[in-house]
Image (cartoon, helix red, strand yellow):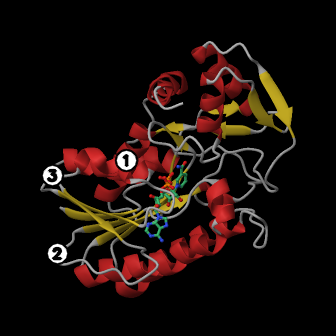
Amino acid sequence: MRVLVTGGAGFIGSHLCDRLLAEGHQVIAMDNLITGSTRNIAHLAGRDDFLFIKHNVTNYIYIAGPLDAVLHLASPASPIDYIQLPIQTLKVGSLGTLNALGLAREKGARFLLASTSEVYGDPLVHPQPETYHGNVDPVGPRSVYDEAKRFAEALTMAYHHTHRLDTRIARIFNCYGPRMRLEDGRVVPNFIAQALRGEPLTVYGDGSQTRSFCYISDLVEGLYRLLLSSEHQPVNLGNPHEVSILDFARMINTITGNSAGIIFQDRRIKGDPEKRRPDITRARTLLGWEPQVSLEEGLRLTIEWFRDRV
Ligand SMILES: NC(=O)c1ccc[n+]([C@@H]2O[C@H](COP(=O)([O-])OP(=O)(O)OC[C@H]3O[C@@H](n4cnc5c(N)ncnc54)[C@H](O)[C@@H]3O)[C@@H](O)[C@H]2O)c1
């Protein structure tokens, strides 16, 4: 296949490019580098099956030649990023998705949207199945991201129903691994950076809030299987192993040998969900997919990668 990955210089996008190339596909990565970096794809430079195009997908997307798939990952993803970039986040979720869908339609390509567990907002149903419609504040601080992704999902389904476009929607839950930005504000790089510097880990709130973390290789496997499937309804991709933020912090201190402990601070972002855990029955049934990498193993791999960079 000849595949376009928007957001291809980001954390997940760059790993997806690696996987697509390893499967023998030709890859075009498109990115405006607003939260990504060419460092993530530097190892691919010079390959004749890989092309990088710097472009803001909020503007019309032109690609010469055929395309078999458009994977739309472009969007700020960390709360710190999208709260600093509210209009860009809304534009890439709306106009960017419209342009990516238009391109897929023009080329007769299949389309995959990287959506998010944030469409469930601060969920009142736990764990979250795809049939849960969410609890989102449309004017809250996280709304720029949550509503952009909800709109992107609606637009994707409209293209599927109206134009018979061959679409997929992945609802991605927290994912972690090498190539996350140290300063992107997400809990995994925050904790690891503090631990490797020998500082106490900062837990916001009392640490009883839960998350479930999926290692990047597992997520990429799920995205690839979804792309090859014929499922048009949203599919949750994440790790159902739930851990409290406090236990997670303790785990990182143990693995890194950090004896500086933990400090507690007030929550930074209003609307921070209390609980997050995917119901992955649909992915298990339809894709035969479930995460293989344990939290401890994934953290060891991620910490190794961060060790040289802190
Ligand atoms: N990482 C996670 O845990 C997670 C969870 C749920 C959903 N997602 C989704 O997965 C996708 C990738 O997330 P990530 O964690 O790799 O984030 P990231 O910030 O590392 O990657 C996003 C990439 O999109 C690019 N981008 C943003 N706006 C753009 C625009 N207008 N034009 C072109 N490129 C643009 C950025 O420069 C960046 O390289 C996002 O759509 C995100 O919403 C990620």
Establish whether ligand 1 lies closer than 8 Å to the Cβ of label 1: yes
Give the amino acid type for the residue marked by disc 1 in the picture.
Answer: Asn
Nearest the viewer among 38 and 49 is: 38
In percent of width and height, residue 165 lies at 34, 78
Nearest the viewer among 276 and 4 is: 4
Of callouts 1 and 2, the N-terminal one: 1
From this view, report whether residue 173 is shown above or below residue 84: above
Of callouts 3 and 2, the N-terminal one: 3
Q: Is residue 95 left or right of residue 167?
A: right
Which label lies toward us, 1 or 2?
1
Q: Which quarter of the picture shows residue 195?
A: top right
Q: Which residue is mark 2?
A: 66
Disc 1 + disc 2, Cβ < 8 Å: no
Q: Quadrant of the N terminus?
A: bottom left
Give the amino acid type for the residue marked by disc 3 in the picture.
Answer: Arg
Whole-number angstrom distance, CA of label 1 to CA of label 3:
15 Å
Q: Which residue is mark 1?
A: 40
Number of the label disc, if any, that sits on residue 47: 3
In percent of width and height, residue 266 lies at 87, 42
Give the amino acid type for the residue marked by disc 2 in the picture.
Answer: Pro
In percent of width and height, residue 239 lies at 54, 38
* Residue 154 visible in the shown view: no
Identified at 76% across, 64% down, the residue is 141
